[in-house]
Image (cartoon, coloured by chain):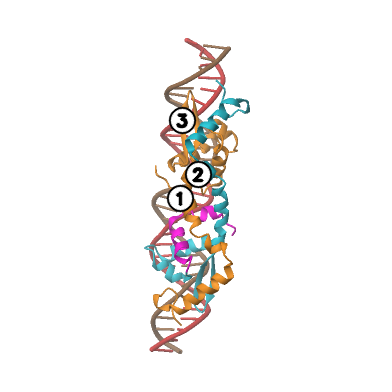
Chain colours: A cyan, B orange, C red, D brown
Amino acid sequence: MQRDVFQAIADPTRREILGMIAYRSLNVNAVSGHFDITRAAVYKHLKILREAGLVEIKQAGRERICHAKMQKLEVVSDWVEQYRKLWNQKLDSLEAYLDKLQNSGKTKGGISDK
Amino acid sequence: MQRDVFQAIADPTRREILGMIAYRSLNVNAVSGHFDITRAAVYKHLKILREAGLVEIKQAGRERICHAKMQKLEVVSDWVEQYRKLWNQKLDSLEAYLDKLQNSGKTKGGISDK
DNA sequence: TATATATGAAACCTTTTGGTTTCGCAAGTG
DNA sequence: CACTTGCGAAACCAAAAGGTTTCATATATA
């Protein structure tokens, strides 16, 4: 439980599962039917997604319906977006600017002085 | 090479490395110095980040300077943001709406008809 | 030149992943 | 009730991950 969302979405099969059920919940069989791997393997992926909070499974008769909880992706969004300014701007000029900073403030270490 | 960015950022150590060098490039030793694991282990993480295109390493004398290439995160941003509307809106009402859609169009399978 | 620094890479190890088979059980159905 | 469906879980496996130690090599420096 409380598995890392970053790790949960690292696997392409799991991202595909999320895409499948994002707008339309499906039962376990329907999900596994879209893949070439066994139902058991898909079930394991679902378990990992559940542990990350990205999927909830509710019983309906003998079926278990998989619901995507995409709001859990917000932690990923937050992490990525904090760096957006680093690639949204003209990177060349930004890098030139940062290089200047780096060359003027060498005392902090990291890159050894020559 | 051409390693998956999602998998590259799945590891917390690698995300921390990226955070360290995002605004200020560092040499390999400086990066590994911030972790309790061995330099060799950090070097392996750097290798994975490099293979994903998230880090570039340039030689400078006997040092190798690690530069973060955060624009590579855009593929992650794109994937996540396509689902933002699913959690930005009042989810309860959206889900109710989708449930209606689901109950009216049962022919497509997925959830078996009762 | 001898020594110290900064890396790269190989060999080896343990745990985690991603899969497969197999078996058991609960819930609908004929 | 017997049978089919839809799952969940266990046992087992090979490969990948994440680490460690060790060794070789290139670049500075005293």
Seen in the picture, residue B60 relative to A22 is either above or below; the reply is above
Say which mark, if any, is on residue A88: 2
Seen in the picture, residue A96 relative to B81 is either above or below; the reply is above
Q: Quadrant of the N terminus of chain A?
A: bottom right
Residue contact at pointers 1 and 2, CB within 8 angstroms:
no
- The residue that label 3 is drawn on is B58
Which residue is found at the position 43% from the left and 56% from the top?
A12
Residue B12 appears at what percent x and percent y? Answer: 56, 46
Say which mark, if any, is on residue A107: none
Of the pair A7 and D7, the residue shown nearer to us: A7
Residue C8 appears at what percent x and percent y? Answer: 44, 31
Q: Quadrant of the C terminus of chain A?
A: top right
- Amino acid identity at mark 1: Val
Q: Secondary structure at mark 1?
A: helix
- Amino acid identity at mark 3: Lys
Residue A11 magenta-highlighted: yes
Q: Chain of mark 1?
A: B
Q: How far is mark 1 from mark 2, CA to CA?
A: 13 Å
Give the residues in magenta: A1-23
Seen in the picture, residue A30 relative to C29 is either above or below; the reply is above
Seen in the picture, residue A24 relative to A8 is either above or below; the reply is below
- The residue that label 1 is drawn on is B75
